[in-house]
Amino acid sequence: MKAKLQMADQGALSYLARRGVSPQWRGFVRALLGIARAHLPEEARQTFLRALGEGMAREMTLPPCESLAALEAAMNAALAEAEWGYVEVALDEAQAAMVLRHAAAPHISLPEDPSGAWIVPVLEGLYQAWLDAQPGAVAGVPVRQAAHEGALVVLRYAQAA
């Protein structure tokens, strides 16, 4: 029963992610990603997409947050305004990491990327910039993908092991 609920939730998230992208932006984003694919090697393309996420964070600044709950609320307020899904933030104390579970980010599939995985480095850059700007942030702690399944992206903010 639990697996079916998760599948239903995943289907709903995927639907919302596809629906949340305005038709006038789909062609633009596909063209942008196609040009990046044609002109940039994979590593440079990932760097470019992370930089786009960082640029978004500069446009959607967060206030200084004194607690994890306040940080999650501020992130979700900014994401809601942009219609970019939502995030759940948790601590993984055993691995000294912050876990960010981002759901329902805009989904635009490409022939060479039907899962829309291009969004992952954009989210990495977005959360990296947001977290780096928070009080007490430690320089050099990366935000990296832990998992990507359908409309759910799991990111980890932790020192490299």
Image (spheres, grey):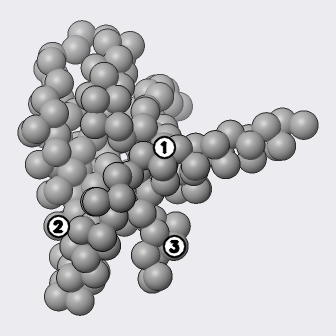
Tell me the distance, in whole angstroms, between the alpha carbons under discs 2 and 3.
20 Å
N-term-proximal mark, 1 vs 2: 2
Above or below residue 17? Residue 26 is: below
Q: Which residue is mark 1?
A: 104
Locate residue 13, reporting x and y percent: 58, 43
- Which residue is label 3 attached to? 114
Considering only vertical position in the picture, is 2 above or below 111? above
SS at badge 2: helix
The answer to whether 32 is drawn above or below residue 75 in the figure is below
Residue 49's disc is: none
> Residue placed at 23% from the left, 63% from the top?
49
x, y percentage for residue 110?
43, 75
Discs 2/3, front: 3
Q: What residue appears at the point 27 percent right and 66 percent down from the top-left corner? A: 29
Mark number displayed over residue 48: 2
Residue type at mark 1: give it: Ala
Tell me the amino acid under the disc marked 3.
Pro
Where does the image place residue 31, in percent across and percent down from the top left? 25, 76
Crowd tier of the residue under label 3, counting other residues whose Cα lies within 10 Å: few below 14, some 14–19, many 20 or above: few
In the picture, the quarter occupied by the N terminus is top right
Furthest residue toward front: 24
CA distance separating discs 3 and 1: 16 Å
Q: Amino acid at mark 2?
A: Phe
Dot 3 lies on which element? loop
